[in-house]
Amino acid sequence: MGPVSDAQKRATAKYIRTKLDEIKIRVSKGQKNLIKEHANKQGESLNKFIIRAIYETMERDNLKTQKKREG
């Protein structure tokens, strides 16, 4: 792959600005590498792994809430 053109850089920046939100998280020193290694073992990027972890936790929490209401 050659260098990225200025037009492509602008298009990418515009896409990020208009389509994505950013969340910054902090972890203890050394934890990032542990999480990243785990994500790699799962065949995922760090970002994709974190997003999956969030959504799976939200789903699990919602199921717990639903069971409490039913039970």
Image (tube, helix red, strand yellow):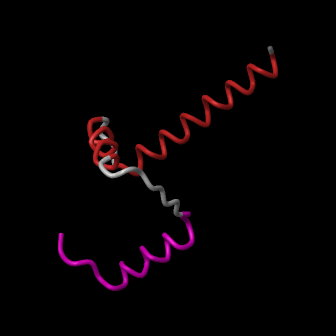
Q: Which residue shows up at 42% across the image and 73% down it?
A: 12
Q: Is residue 2 magenta?
A: yes
> For residue 8, what is the image quadrant?
bottom left
Mainly helix, strand or loop, the magenta region? helix
Q: Residue furthest top?
A: 71
Q: Position of residue 66 (x, y in %)?
A: 75, 25
Residue situated in front as seen by the camera: 11 or 36: 36
Q: Is residue 49 left or right of residue 33?
A: right
For residue 12, above or below residue 62: below
For residue 70, above or below residue 12: above
Q: Residue furthest left?
A: 2
Q: Position of residue 10 (x, y in %)?
A: 42, 82
Q: Position of residue 22 (x, y in %)?
A: 52, 63
Q: Which residue shows up at 74% across the image and 19% down it?
A: 67
Question: Quadrant of the image for the C terminus?
Answer: top right
Q: Position of residue 32 (x, y in %)?
A: 33, 49
Q: Is residue 28 magenta?
A: no
For residue 15, above or below residue 23: below
Q: Residue furthest front?
A: 28
> For residue 5, what is the image quadrant?
bottom left
Q: Which residue shows up at 36% across the image and 79% down it?
A: 9
Residue situated in front as seen by the camera: 69 or 15: 69
Q: Which residue shows up at 43% across the image and 77% down it?
A: 11
Q: Which residues are magenta?
A: 1-21
